[in-house]
Image (cartoon, helix red, strand yellow):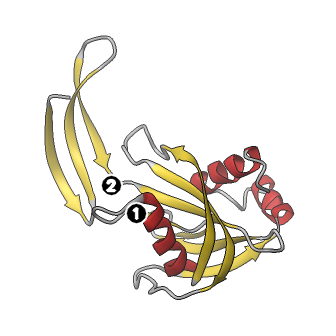
Amino acid sequence: MSNTNVIHRWKRLALEERVIQRPDGCKTVETIVHHPGAVLIVPVLENGDLVMVRQYRSAIDDWIYEFPAGTLEESETAEVCAKRELAEETQLVAKTWTKLGVIFPAPGFCDEEMHIFLASDLSDGSGIPDEDEFIDVISLSIDDIDKMLLDNTLKDSKTISALYLTKKHRLL
């Protein structure tokens, strides 16, 4: 990459026009969303149920089921962000954190890296919810979540990826 032009900034995101050298050596101009990175948390209750949020997402003008997630603040580590987001969205704190992996949720147009954590040994906590978020906190069994996945009620790709990683790590 030899040249980047910022077209627009919004919050911590930037819409950039970048000159990219492709694997075949040709240069092309691509429009990319630059993202500071994010986290997703899979909160597991003592009984094995998982904590999810039902959140209104304006981009799809609908409510969607997902695990708690959020964007990294400036100079914030992924683990610190995960702890903050869990408290803000669910009013829970976790004693035990396990990093499950990193995914690229939308690599066709965005450079966002999302760090996925499992949070356990949960207890009540406090966090200040973002005023522009509309969230209902729910707990569901893994069987109920599997049914939601199969009947297409669970459509959030980052949540589906995190669920798969959690199962593959044999943590559910």
Please tell me which residue lies in front, 49 or 11.
49
Q: Is residue 66 visible?
A: no
> Residue at the right extreme?
143
> Residue at the top extreme?
24
Which residue shows up at 20% across the image and 59% down it? 9
Give the image quarter of residue 68: bottom right
Please tell me which residue lies in front, 20 or 153.
20
Q: Are marks 2 and 1 in contact (CB under 8 Å)?
A: yes
Q: Which residue is mark 1?
A: 71
What x and y, as percent, mark residue 133? 46, 79
Q: Is residue 23 above or below residue 9?
A: above
What x and y, as percent, mark residue 168? 74, 44
Which residue shows up at 13% across the image and 42% down it? 5
Q: Secondary structure at mark 1?
A: strand
- Mark seen at residue 160: none
Q: How many labels sit on residues?
A: 2
Q: Quadrant of the N terminus?
A: top left
Q: Amino acid at mark 1?
A: Thr
What x and y, as percent, mark residue 17? 20, 40
Q: Amino acid at mark 2?
A: Pro
Q: Which mark is first along the chain, 1 or 2?
A: 2
Which residue shows up at 54% across the image and 74% down it? 86
Please tell me which residue lies in front, 167 or 119.
119
Q: Quadrant of the C terminus?
A: bottom right
Q: CA distance from mark 2 to mark 1?
A: 7 Å
Q: Is residue 120 left or right of residue 33?
A: right
Dot 2 alpha-carbon crowd within 10 angstroms: few under 14, some 14 to 19, many 20 or more: some
Q: Which residue is mark 2?
A: 36
What x and y, as percent, mark residue 99? 58, 53
